[in-house]
């Protein structure tokens, strides 16, 4: 059983020793994830070697312990259900908040830190809801304001719009994938992502896109395959200790990570996971001196300079162009490497194609996405999130003090650096460990044989080791302010 395996894992002296060793190594450390410069207390090659060694040990651990038969996971990704949208009061309140945010962005101050729309959306929704979803499941299904569009308008005309309804699942998935890539590009590359008015216009645009999508494809199909917030937070929610599938609160409890199952969706749903993971990684790359130096090198090449000059690009435009190229290149490279890994595994199991393996193993990347999300953004949430105390008293940046908190001082020392570094290191390593465990379970489900499962799993294990080293190397780099 799952409990027996986890009990063994937690009681395993080697595992605990390695975990505590890495945690206690961190003294006077500042990481890339803490948004300040730092110096590692040990040489970086030791830091990378010993971190990757934990993953290697896990690879052989899952082979010799032979626990795959005892791990129970769900076999199907649940689609959006009507019962998920019964929190009318919460969703009414959520809709009012989003309308208020739109008004704040349009009418309030256009300084990014003086308008509540920026902090509330980028900190408390995009990061905060993601963290809550990792623990409590997909809470977006409960607070989703877009659902009120259906309840207020489309529900009463559902009989009249049936003749316009489209039933293609592939169309919806492609639309959702396009929206995800565009949103991730805007969130990470666009220099206007913190302009309140533009953010309000994008909210309005997304309202209309969601409205039209539900009109043509239906609410459940749209929310399951194209509403990127529901899919993204639902993806992270598969790691949680709550299944959110029963009305009985007690029955929703489950073992952590047990909601991550073998992929049974389409190639596009698998691409959604891969693109989401690679986008989070690129967000870390984007802030490093490594990427800054690469861009400077490209700009310094004479014939490239002439080409850019001919296009009439200035420095700011060129910077966005290079960041955009980097964004799409990272997505392509990461997806290609994962496909190549699937192709290599295919040699060990002839009855499945690389495409089917890509679909089957893509959910194993979800713990990595959650780990990097925690490592990269937790200090951002703790420090930038404090701005909400100021902005609730002055949401439009007009000098108000409605609740007496407008002069609240931000505590930048809220996070102990030693603890912060321990969280970063532990989250990345543990996330990759569980990715190895889950991918081994998937390999066993495909082959139904421990030995063959390990052979199929081995290329993915190598992929996990290299990705662990890469992730920790990026987090170890000082950021460029």
Image: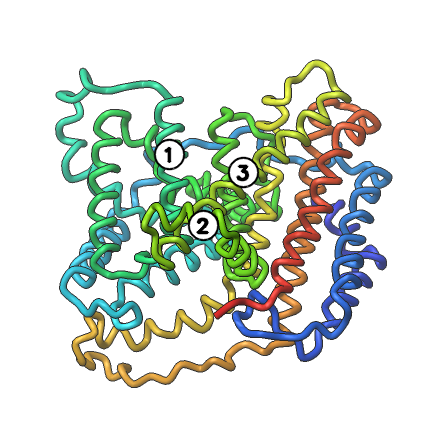
Q: Earlier in the sequence, mark 2 or mark 3?
A: 3
Q: Residue at x 47, y 28 (%)?
A: 268
Q: Is residue 388 left or right of residue 463?
A: left
Q: Nearer the viewer, mark 2 or mark 1?
A: 2
For mark 2, give the secondary structure.
Answer: helix
Q: Is residue 406 left or right of residue 176?
A: left
Q: How many numbered tags mark residues here?
A: 3
Which of the labelled discs sits on residue 314, or is there none? none
Task: Give the vertical position of 227 relative to 200 (above or below).
Answer: above
Task: Give the vertical position of 35 relative to 376 (above or below).
Answer: below
Q: Is residue 342 left or right of residue 333?
A: right
Of 310 and 445, nearer the camera is 310
For mark 1, give the secondary structure.
Answer: helix
Q: Report if residue 251 is visible in the image.
A: no
Q: Quadrant of residue 63?
A: top right
Query: Callout 3: 10 Å neighbours few (<14), some, many (20+)?
Result: many
Query: Callout 1: 10 Å neighbours few (<14), some, many (20+)?
Result: many
For mark 3, give the secondary structure.
Answer: helix
Q: Earlier in the sequence, mark 2 or mark 1?
A: 1
Relative image position of residue 248 (x, y in whole percent) = 45, 44
Query: Callout 2: 10 Å neighbours few (<14), some, many (20+)?
Result: some
**Residue located beneath label 1 in the image:** 176
**Residue located beneath label 2 in the image:** 322
Q: Residue at x 84, y 27 (%)?
A: 451
């Amino acid at each position: 059983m799952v409990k027996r395996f986890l009990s063994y894992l937690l009681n395993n002296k080697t595992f605990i020793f390695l975990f505590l060793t890495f945690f206690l190594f961190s003294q006077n450390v500042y990481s890339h994830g803490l948004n300040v410069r730092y110096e590692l207390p040990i040489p970086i090659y030791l830091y990378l070697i010993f971190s990757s060694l934990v993953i290697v040990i896990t690879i052989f651990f899952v082979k010799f312990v032979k626990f795959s038969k005892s791990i129970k996971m769900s076999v199907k990704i649940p689609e959006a259900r009507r019962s998920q949208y019964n929190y009318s009061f919460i969703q009414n309140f959520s809709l009012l908040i989003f309308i208020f945010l739109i008004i704040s962005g349009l009418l309030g101050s256009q300084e990014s830190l003086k308008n509540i729309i920026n902090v509330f959306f980028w900190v408390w929704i995009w990061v905060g809801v993601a963290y809550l979803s990792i623990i409590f499941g997909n809470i977006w299904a409960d607070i989703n304001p877009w659902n009120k569009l259906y309840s207020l308008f489309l529900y009463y005309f559902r009989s009249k719009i049936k003749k316009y309804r489209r039933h293609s699942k592939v169309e919806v998935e492609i639309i959702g994938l396009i929206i995800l890539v565009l949103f991730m590009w805007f969130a990470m590359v666009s220099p206007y992502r913190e302009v309140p008015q533009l953010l309000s216009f994008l909210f309005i645009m997304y309202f209309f896109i969601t409205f039209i999508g539900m009109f043509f494809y239906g609410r459940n199909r749209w929310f399951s395959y194209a509403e990127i917030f529901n899919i993204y937070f639902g993806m992270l929610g598969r790691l949680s200790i709550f299944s959110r599938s029963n009305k009985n609160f007690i029955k929703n409890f489950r073992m952590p990570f047990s909601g991550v199952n073998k992929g049974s969706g389409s190639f596009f749903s698998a691409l959604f996971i891969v693109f989401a993971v690679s986008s989070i990684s690129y967000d870390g790359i984007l802030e490093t001196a490594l990427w800054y130096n690469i861009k400077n090198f490209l700009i310094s090449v004479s014939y490239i300079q002439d080409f850019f000059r001919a296009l009439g690009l200035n420095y700011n435009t060129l910077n966005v162009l290079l960041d955009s190229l980097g964004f799409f290149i990272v997505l392509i490279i990461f997806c290609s490497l994962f496909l190549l890994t699937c192709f290599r595994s295919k040699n060990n199991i002839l009855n499945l194609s690389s495409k089917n393996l890509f679909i089957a193993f893509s959910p194993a990347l979800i713990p990595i996405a959650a780990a990097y999300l925690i490592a990269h953004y937790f200090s951002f949430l703790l420090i930038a999130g404090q701005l909400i105390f100021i902005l609730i008293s002055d949401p439009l940046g007009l000098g108000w003090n409605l609740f007496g908190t407008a002069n609240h001082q931000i505590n930048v020392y809220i996070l102990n650096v030693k603890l912060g570094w321990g969280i970063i290191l532990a989250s990345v390593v543990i996330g990759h460990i569980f990715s190895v465990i889950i991918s081994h379970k998937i390999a066993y489900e495909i082959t139904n044989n421990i030995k063959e499962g390990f052979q199929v799993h081995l290329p993915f294990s190598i992929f996990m080791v290299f990705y662990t080293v890469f992730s920790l190397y990026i987090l170890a780099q000082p950021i460029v302010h």
